[in-house]
Each structure stands twice: as structure tokens, then as C-alpha cells.
Amino acid sequence: MRLGQNENRFGHTRSQNVGSRARHAFLAALLFAPTALLWGCSGIVSGQSTQPSPAPQTYSISGTISPVAGGSGATVTLSGAASGTTTVNSSGNYTFSSLANGTYTLTPSHAGYTFSPSSLNVTVSGANVTTGLNFTATATANPTYSISGTVSPTVGGSGATLTLSGAATGTTTADSAGNYMFSGLANGGYAVTPSHTGYTFNPTSQSAAVNGVNVTGINFTAATNPTFSISGTISPVAGGSGATVTLTGAAGATTIANSTGNYTFVGLANGTYTVTPSNAGYTFAPVNQSVTINAANVSTVNFTATPQLAHSAALIWTPSTSTVSGYNVYRGTVNGGPYTLMNSSLVTGLSYTDTAVQSGATYYYVTTAVDSNNVESLNSNQATAVIP
């Protein structure tokens, strides 16, 4: 009976002990569960933020140019959403790869051939395009080719003139980047020569042989053309200071000699020039000088100034046989008149000096006699004066 009770109590006690442990375990689980949930959520959020974005997908465009003779080695140019060029392989096939969605234009070219169609438009939209992009090449009856190149740097190439000689002739002007092209050329030997004011070129000319293909890379280098000066002195200072010096010939210009009679012309290219001085009241020896610039300054173009002599015309006449109060002097520039009165009052003597004359001119003079009643006689015989 006691044993039974003990067993019963033991059993009851055991049952109570188990229940207590279960409750403890349950409480522990409740305490630790939120922490575990928080850790788990933290790990999930971190994983989503570092996941890489997928790379954008690209596609290709491909086609064929036939027959092989016109397709092999042809160039296909891509323009539109992207640009590029490719060379058709020996079977006439071509491909452009790594293209994004968009609209493109394909244009084939091959020296000596025309193409049908001349170009094709194609739209890439989520897939490679491999059909409908074929061209047919047709050999031209009389194929022509081109010669092209660049003149650099741009400052010397832009606007340069290129002259073609040989199997055909022509000229063209390089564009703003220095590029040029001669097209429509038959097979044959040619030469290209550049020119541009103020520049020299290396090489000065190039040969180009056209033989069934376009010729590229006929390039030139432009260098600034050196310039030189012409200078000298006009002496003495009295005649040189302020004198005008005129340059003619390969270039034209004027300059004024400084207070010591020195002058200079700068920025001159090689060539032949003439230098001529002038200054009112002076003559110069020599009258002018010819000067040739040949890759060097010319600094001894000197002149001597000489004051011009004062010129005049001295007139004398025989007295009138009548009693007179004086004489009038008349001058003309045409033989036989008309004449202009020179004196402001009657000349009482038998001579008159005309100082208002110009070198190199010819004058014609007559005189008249005036009596006390202010009656004037007829003109005397005409006298001629040639001023040196």
C-alpha cells in the first residue's frame, strides 16, 4: 500500500518534473525565437542588395554579297544606331555583331562594282537578323578609281590646293580637316602636288599608280613658309627722315623712313622686289633698286637724297619806243596761248623772274606795254621757257 503510494507519488513527482522541464524548454524557445527570426531576416535582406544586374543582350546582322567576285573583299558600312565597317570574306559573307536593338543602314562598296540595292535598312528587335540582307554586285563596264590622302597639320592642310597630273589632270581643294580626293580615275600613272600660300610641303610631290583599286594614303606635311625682310637707310637724315618707301614686285607695300632715315619691310617671301623712295623737295640716287630675296634677309638697300634745285624762268625785254608807265607779263602752258597775267602791279623795269614753275614743264610768255592812260599795247613776241 505504501509502496503503491510511493510509486504513485513517484510517478506523480516524475510527471510533475517532466512537466516543469517542458515548460522551461518552451519558455526558452520563446525567448530565443525572435532573435533567430531577426538574424534570418537580416541575412535575406543583405543577399538581395548585392545581387548583380544581368548584362544587356546584343545581337548580330549578317548577309551575303554575290557573286563572290564582287563580294569578296568588298566593304560594308554600318550606320544608324551604331556605326562601323567590315570586310566581306572570300565567300562573300559579312557580319556585324554586338549590336543593341535599333535601326541600322548597310551600304556596300567595292572598286569596279555597283550594288543592287545600293543600301538596306534593318531593324534589330530582340533577335539576330540573318535574312533579307543580301546584295548583288555588278562589275562596271569602265571601272574608275580614286586617289586620296591628307595634308597635315590642319592649319596648313585646310584649303590647300592639290593638283593632279599624269594620265589625267585636275585640281581639288582639301577640306577643313586637310582631306582630299580625286575620283573617277582610270588605271594609269599620276602625280599629286600640293600648294598653299605661306607653306612648303614634304614631299613636294608624290606619284600614285592606279591599277584596279583605289589609292589611299597619299599624304603630305605642311610647314610654315619662312619670311624675310628688306631694309636700308636714306641719307642724309634731312632727306631720309619721313621719306616714303614703296615696295613692288612679288609683294606690294609702303612704309615711312624713321627719324634717322631707316626703313624696313618684313614678312616677305622669296622673290624679286623693287624699292623706290620719295620725299618732296628731294631727288634720290639711285632712283630705285631691284632686290631679290633668296632665303635670307636683305639689309643694305640704301639711297642718297639730294635737295632739288629751285627752278625759275627769267624774262628780259627791250623797252617800248613810246613813253609808258610800265609792263604786264603773261604766261601760258599752251603754245600761242591763252595767257594769264602774272604780275599784280605794273613792272617798271625790263625784266621779270617767274618762280612759280614746276620741274619738267614748258611755259610760254608775252609782255605788253601800258601808258599813262592805262592803254595796253598788243602782245610782244612769244618767249618759251623749258624748266629742267
Image (cartoon, grey):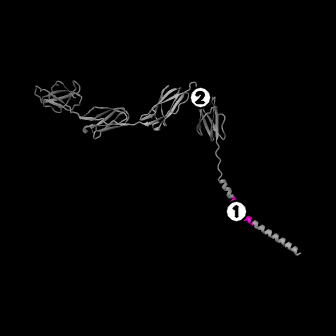
Q: Residues within 10 Å of mark 1 (few under 14, many from 20)?
A: few
- Asked whether residue 169 is in view, the answer is no
- Residue interval drawn in magenta: 27-40
Which amino acid type is marked by label 2?
Thr
Nearest to N terminus: mark 1 or mark 2: 1
x, y (%) of residue 35?
A: 70, 62
- Asked whether residue 246 is in view, the answer is yes
Does residue 2 appear to the left or right of 177 in the view shown?
right
Of 241 and 72, which appears nearest the observer? 72
Q: Which residue is painted at 68% across and 56% down in the image?
A: 44
Farthest bottom residue?
Answer: 2
Which amino acid type is marked by label 1?
Thr
Does residue 212 appear to the left or right of 361 in the view shown?
right
x, y (%) of residue 300?
A: 30, 36
The answer to whether mark 1 and mark 2 are in CB contact below 8 A is: no
**C-alpha distance separating marks 1 and 2:** 78 Å
Which secondary structure, mark 2?
Answer: strand
Farthest right residue?
Answer: 1
Magenta: predominant secondary structure element? helix
Q: Which mark is residue 159?
A: none
Does residue 179 appear to the left or right of 382 in the view shown?
right
Q: Which residue is painted at 44% across and 37% down in the image?
A: 223
Q: Quadrant of the C terminus?
A: top left
Q: Residues within 10 Å of mark 2 (few under 14, many from 20)?
A: some
Does 31 lie within the magenta span? Answer: yes
Q: Which mark is residue 114?
A: 2
Q: Which residue is painted at 61% across and 27% down in the image?
A: 138
Q: Which mark is residue 35?
A: 1
x, y (%) of residue 43?
A: 68, 57
x, y (%) of residue 89?
A: 62, 33
